């Protein structure tokens, strides 16, 4: 991994009881890339994102962000520095409109009402939500809500956006809208870590990927090479004893 990494982990570890959910994980994320984080269910991907965003305290190891050690900072401190996790669960207020949800999110990030309103309008347009922007967010479809969550995460774009299975259970049309959004923002310089089981999208979006299995990194490199490597194929098959 290069010294130029925007984010870097060193020996990152987390145990739950006897389970080594994350076991001495080292990787780097370069500024401006979409880094894929893949691996079978239970391999430790969500636990890594939770530690990077401060929702879980590591048992061991370090996290470096933009040249500074951030291992023990709180979620709020990390979000201020620009390490922001998008939630799998929805954090949308259901009884106010999508527009107002974005307004509240923006003002919560310290924007003026005017600036938040301008950004909200632009994001709703970009996310194809303009036709429903004044409806209660509770009446949106699951996919529309997911798009709104993207908007809330990007009202003040983070330095690194951590996305945990954003495409899961989302209608293919909206999945495409999300992929377009990620691609467009990346072209403008946005850095992402993307956890997804949707391999065609991972291959399409992620220049580089890290694959985990049983808490450990088992492959790193260009996404296609990682997915086609023997340890990764064996991990997805369930066990190397099949070979
Ligand atoms: N809060 C928790 N308490 C106990 N075990 C957990 C907890 N969170 C995750 N685990 C365990 O840690 C391992 C990694 O889980 P997770 O990070 O969710 O994997 P992934 O996101 O790759 O599916 C799994 O064995 C899982 O059962
Ligand atoms: Mg997970």
Image: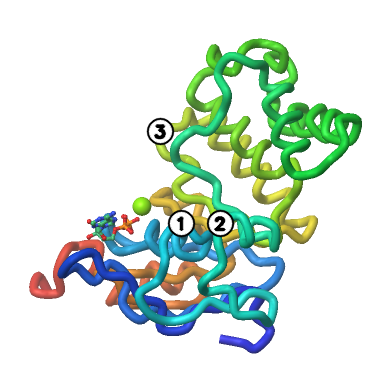
Identify the residue shown where x is 76% and y is 46%: 156
Q: Are marks 3 and 1 in contact (CB under 8 Å)?
A: no
Going from the N terminus, do you reach mark 2 or mark 1 first? 1
Residues under labels 2 and 1: Cα distance? 6 Å
Tell me, for residue 55, which label it has, or none: 1
- Badge 2 density bin: few <14, some 14–19, many ≥20, Cα 10 Å: some
In the displayed orientation, state which residue is furthest to the bottom.
3
Q: Position of residue 93 (x, y in %)?
A: 57, 23
Quarter of the image with the C terminus in it: bottom left
Identify the residue shown where x is 80% and y is 44%: 110
User: On the rendered structure, is 133 left or right of 74?
Assistant: right
Identify the residue shown where x is 44% and y is 52%: 196
The residue carrying mark 2 is: 75
Circle 3: element type = loop
Going from the N terminus, do you reach mark 2 or mark 3 first? 2
The residue carrying mark 3 is: 169
User: On the rendered structure, is 208 left or right of 218?
Assistant: right
Residue 186, compared with residue 18, is above or below; it is: above
Identify the residue shown where x is 54% and y is 36%: 175
Residues under labels 3 and 1: Cα distance? 24 Å
Going from the N terminus, do you reach mark 3 or mark 1 first? 1
Residue 8 shows up from this direction: yes
User: On the rendered structure, is 68 left or right of 94?
Assistant: right
- Badge 1 density bin: few <14, some 14–19, many ≥20, Cα 10 Å: some
Residue 234 shows up from this direction: no
Q: Position of residue 155 (x, y in %)?
A: 74, 41
Quadrant of residue 240 within the rendered picture: bottom left
Q: Nearer the viewer, residue 208 or 41?
A: 41
Q: Are marks 2 and 1 in contact (CB under 8 Å)?
A: yes
Circle 1: element type = loop
Circle 2: element type = helix
Observer-side mark, 3 or 1, equals 1
């Amino acid at each position: 991994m290069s010294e130029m990494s925007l984010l870097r982990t060193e020996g990152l570890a987390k145990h739950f009881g006897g389970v080594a959910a994350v076991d001495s994980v080292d990787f780097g994320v370069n500024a401006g890339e979409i880094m894929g984080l893949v691996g079978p269910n239970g391999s430790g991907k969500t636990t890594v994102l939770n530690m990077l965003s401060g929702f879980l305290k590591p048992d061991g190891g370090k996290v470096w962000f933009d040249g500074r050690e951030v291992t023990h900072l709180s979620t709020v401190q990390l979000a201020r520095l620009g390490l922001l996790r998008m939630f799998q669960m929805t954090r949308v207020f259901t009884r106010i409109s999508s527009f107002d949800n974005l307004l509240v999110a923006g003002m919560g990030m310290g924007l003026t009402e005017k600036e938040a309103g301008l950004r909200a309008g632009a994001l709703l347009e970009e996310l194809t939500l303009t036709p429903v922007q004044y409806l209660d967010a509770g009446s949106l479809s699951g996919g529309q809500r997911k798009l709104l969550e993207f908007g809330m995460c990007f009202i003040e774009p983070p330095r690194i956006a951590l996305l945990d299975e954003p495409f899961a259970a989302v209608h293919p049309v909206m999945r495409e809208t999300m992929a377009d959004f990620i691609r467009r923002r990346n072209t403008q310089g946005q850095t992402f870590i993307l956890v997804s089981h949707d391999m065609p999208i991972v291959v399409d979006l992620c220049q580089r990927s890290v694959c985990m299995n049983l808490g450990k990194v088992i492959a790193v490199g260009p996404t296609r090479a990682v997915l086609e490597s023997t340890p990764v194929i064996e991990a997805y098959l369930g066990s190397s004893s099949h070979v």
